[in-house]
Image: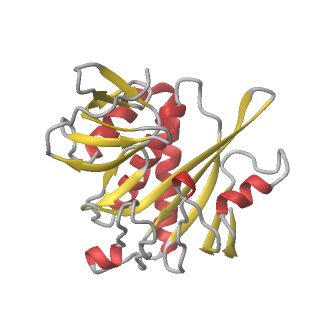
Amino acid sequence: MHCFEELESTSAWLRSRERGATPAWTVAWAATQTRGRGRQGRTWQSPRGNLYLSVSLPAPSASAPGLLPLAAGVAVAQALAGWGVPARLKWPNDVLLGDRKLAGILIEASSYGGALEQVILGIGVNLSVTPRLEDPGAQAPTSMEESLGRAPDVASVGAAVLKQVVQWHARLADQPAAVRAAWRSLSADWWDEAVEIRTPAHAWEGVLRGLSDEGGLLVELPDGRLTTVTAGEVLRLRRAPVSSGGNPPG
């Protein structure tokens, strides 16, 4: 474990190390980040008082990469449950408290010689400080202090999160069904609801019907076909009827 008062990014620090210098389960932990990142190039604000850590993971099996963000979400939610936090999970990697974002997960992978070599899991949890909402398209943030009136110390939460990450990572290889079931039990209650899903090329609507074996979303299109979404963002959850707008490719 490498602990810092300040880093540009805990994940960037792990990535910058020479090959072989970050064996599995190397952890970078920072009190604050100057250039923390979230999904889709968003900035992850990193004021002091919250948790920012990244860990180099063993490469998952060929069948598990899509389940890795789900397993990480379960790990964070179960760790926070120790402080009475009723966290829910939003596909693929948001941890919510109510309808606001409490924690985020970012997974970055690199390959060498065509084989997956390094996987870095970044985790940020808002404990005592609620970041400003700078991107109108992002989920509104919250913190444990704001929502529950209390916040545990950073070290205690970090230790609990890492313990859960180790346990749930171990289940990816031999208990993938347990990972899916745990994620589904903690997921936000938006199944069988109409949603909008946005990818870099398309925005379209459908009804969420389930989770695929590989960790994708099963979405029913307006024409009744079922498709699997493996990348994208659920922008809004609503009970309005599904429109007859454009379908995704394929």
Q: How is the image coloured?
A: secondary structure
Q: Residue furthest right?
A: 18
Total labels drawn? 0
> Does residue 240 appear left or right of residue 175 in this picture?
left
The quarter in which the C terminus is drawn is top left
x and y percentages locating residue 152 in the rendered image? 40, 75
Q: Residue at x 56, y 66 (%)?
A: 52
Say which quarter of the image contains residue 9. bottom right
Of the 4 image quadrants, the one containing the N terminus is: bottom right
* Left or right relative to 155: residue 97: left
Residue at image position (66%, 63%) is 10
- Where residue 242 sits: x, y (%)? 19, 36
Q: In this rendering, is residue 220 above or below 35?
A: above
Q: Residue 13: x and y, percent?
A: 73, 61
Is residue 84 placed above or below 237 in the rendered structure?
below
Residue at 34% x, 29% y is 247
Q: Nearer the viewer, residue 12 or 25?
A: 12
The x and y percentages for residue 159 are 51, 62
Q: Please say if 212 is above or below 118.
A: above
Who's the residue at 54% across and 80% down the image? Answer: 48
Residue reaching furthest to the front: 245
